[in-house]
Image: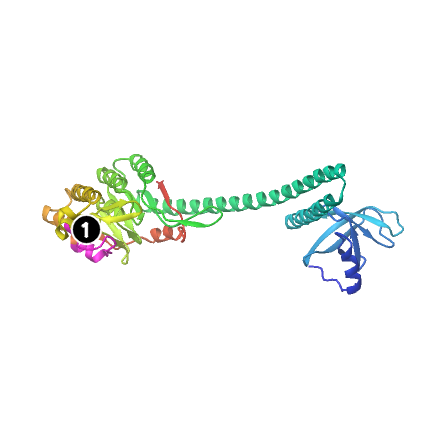
Amino acid sequence: MLRPKRETSNKDRRQSNRVDHQVLVYVAEKEHYYVTRNLSEKGCQLLMQDPPPVGTELTLLLHLPGHKVFQTRGVIRHSDGQGNAVGIEFVELGLLEKVYFSFLRGVRLLKESKQFYEAVKEAQAPQRKIRIREAARKTASVLRVVNTILIVFFLGSAIYGIAKHNLLERHRRSVAREFARMRGSTVITMVHRQETVGLLGIPVKQYIKVEDAESVLRAIRSVPDDKPIDFVIHTPGGILFSAYQIAKALKEHKGKVTVFVPHYAMSGGTLIALAADRIVMDKDAILGPVDPQLIEGNKGFPAVSLVNIPRLKPWKEIDDSTVVMIDQARKSLQQIKHMVKTLLADKMRPHAIETIVTRLTSGEVTHDYPIFPDEARKLGLPVSTDMPDQVYKLMALYPQPGAKSTSRVG
């Protein structure tokens, strides 16, 4: 940045600032400060003695209101050679400087609008109408300037967010392809993390939804029967029937199915893991119970707790809506037990299946109880802790707060 010597006195500065929209400009070739006129993003006029010839390029340092200093270059476009106004055209002005000049123009228009409104109070009736229209025109111009600045800002932010997301997606696909080539499989991912939404950065929690089932089912159906599937999952759970759709499709796939759990696969995520021929977990990763949770309004109630209400109080003291929920809770418990048994059928003996069903659905523990690999193995699940490095690399591309993504590679 050019650093000129400060030769202008404070008195000169105060005098120059009294003139509307006149600022100091330091000309490097003259080593001197000059007062400007008609300053805009296109150029300005300088009061310069013995100006250089027309066409001369100058290095300029603009001292703008608000303690803003910009360095640029300008070309002399006209001059009478006697030290009157010399016309300078800017030839090197960045986007930041242009936006700043637009801001200054908006401020000037606001001041002019205020002057018009004050003049309206003193004007005669015919003149008042003319000035009101002029003030409205000036105000509309200010709003257009402000609107342009806001549009540029929001478009820039949106483009940056899209570019960042696309770059992450390319990295994720690259790591997944490397993983698929190494194992000779098709890699399908279902990762739920908090997702930043919009320009305000509001985090929204992601769960297993109908859209997940649709996209994952399409990915599973596209895999040849004899090709293995490696399913990477990270989820707190979600809609039961969507999770069961995914789990059933994985179980029916004829090739080997391996589910990788790098951090956690709770509730519906555990249901999906039960469909696998092999579950690979990080040594600190967890599964969880799959007992149903009935939702009423914004509240969730464990089904196993609802069915125990008649043991705690007489039926006549239970309101009708709770009776309905108790009935639904009994049915949902029967359904989830059937689902778990179906997913584990042909994989282990009936006694082992009953042990797993009891542990995961009976309400012996809370719905968020963590089941680590050691306990999962004791239950009889085919769990390993040989987690490949590629899975960790993939999860590193889902920073917190991150985004949900379902993809198929290989």
Visible in this render: residue 26? no
- The amino acid on which the numbered mark 1 sits, given as a three-letter code, is Ser
**Residue farthest toward the left in the current orientation of the protein:** 351
At 30% across and 50% down in the image, what residue appears?
Answer: 236
Nearest the camera: 5 or 231?
5
Q: Looking at the image, how many numbered discs can be counted on the residues?
A: 1
Q: Secondary structure at mark 1?
A: helix
**Which region of the structure is painted magenta?**
358-378
Q: Is residue 192 left or right of residue 86?
A: left
At 77% across and 56% down in the image, what residue appears?
Answer: 18
Nearest the camera: 238 or 265?
238
Find disc 1 in the rendering and name its residue. Answer: 305
Give the quadrant of the C terminus: top left
Residue 223 point in image, percent of width and height: 30, 36
Nearest the camera: 35 or 388?
35
Residue 305 point in image, percent of width and height: 19, 51
Give the quadrant of the N terminus: bottom right
348 inside magenta stretch: no
Residue 335 point in image, percent of width and height: 18, 41
Q: Does residue 193 lie above or below 218 as drawn?
A: below
Q: Is residue 233 left or right of residue 156?
A: left
Visible in this render: residue 300? yes
